[in-house]
Image (cartoon, grey):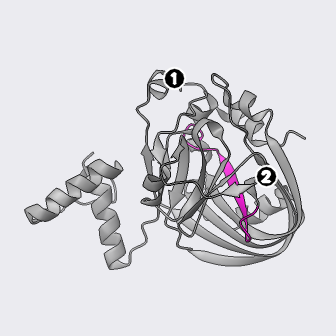
Amino acid sequence: MDNHKLPGFSSLGVNLPQSIVAQLKAHCERTGESIDHTIQRALAQALGVEHHTIYQVSTSTALVQGVYQGCVTVGDVKTHGNFGLGTYDSLDGEGLMLEGEVWQALSDGSVVKPDDSATAPFWACTTFEADKTETLAAVESWDDLLSQLDAMRDSQNLFVAFRIDGQFDQIHYRVACKANPGEDLVTATSHQAEFTLNDCEGTLMGFWSPAYAKTLNVPGYHLHLLSHDHQHGGHVLGIKARNLKVQVMNANNVVIALPESPDFLKADLSADPTAALSKAEGAKT
């Protein structure tokens, strides 16, 4: 797409050495990023201009349809950010990415560090740089947390990354169990493992996605927990907490990398996934 045809963009002719052009093309082939995006990101970093990007592998609709085959390695994910979440091949647990380290929460309640060769069918990550920071004195429930986070968002149309650190008086979370072949997301998560912790220090990491992006990512809030001792983690379902430090980052650029696996290519991704996602993302107990 020619950026000069888009509102807010200008075309700029620049002469570059062949060595840089070769490295630029090699980078784009390796990462899947467009040349436009790579140059925009590099210039934004060099000039100190905000250009927060979310890099996502696959789509929520594909997950709903049971496309769980790993299509990107943990090592590749690390090249696109230092913060985020996802899942693993065959929905084998929850993916946690914090300060450049990647973790795997398993359905037996344990948390491990996967090899860089481990694969993921879905992941969203970013290089986290907070636009603002606030403190929540008290959070009485999941709905209360979301209401307070809503007040911190600037728009209904931007993607937003949230990092939340503090003391959780009680936190309820789930970990997806490894799916059987052919199971869709609702069926696969119907036998998920659920856990409740009291007096846990930890970090919540995740994103808020606009309603218009429901076929790409879970609309609304999607947060994962990693305890500070790295012993507990999963997809957050409920919370009661105090003195939470909330960091917020607006994302004005989203890059989607689509799998080319046979299952993805033949999947019917035309259905509205909202109802299935709501059922799959909720508590079962």
Is the residue marked by circle 1 packed among few (<14), some (14-19), or many (20+) residues within 10 Å?
few
> In this picture, is 124 found above or below 269?
below
> Residue 11: in sight, yes or no?
no
Is the residue marked by circle 2 packed among few (<14), some (14-19), or many (20+) residues within 10 Å?
some
Q: CA distance from mark 1 to mark 2?
A: 32 Å
Q: Secondary structure at mark 2?
A: loop
69 displayed left or right of 75: right
> Residue 141: in sight, yes or no?
yes
270 displayed left or right of 282: left
The residue indicated by pointer 2 is: 109
Q: Which residues are magenta?
A: 214-231
Q: Quadrant of the C terminus?
A: top right
Q: Which residue is painted at 53% across and 67% down in the image?
A: 100
Q: Which residue is painted at 44% across and 59% down in the image?
A: 80
Checking the image for residue 267, the label placed there is: 1
Q: Identify residue type, mark 2.
A: Gly
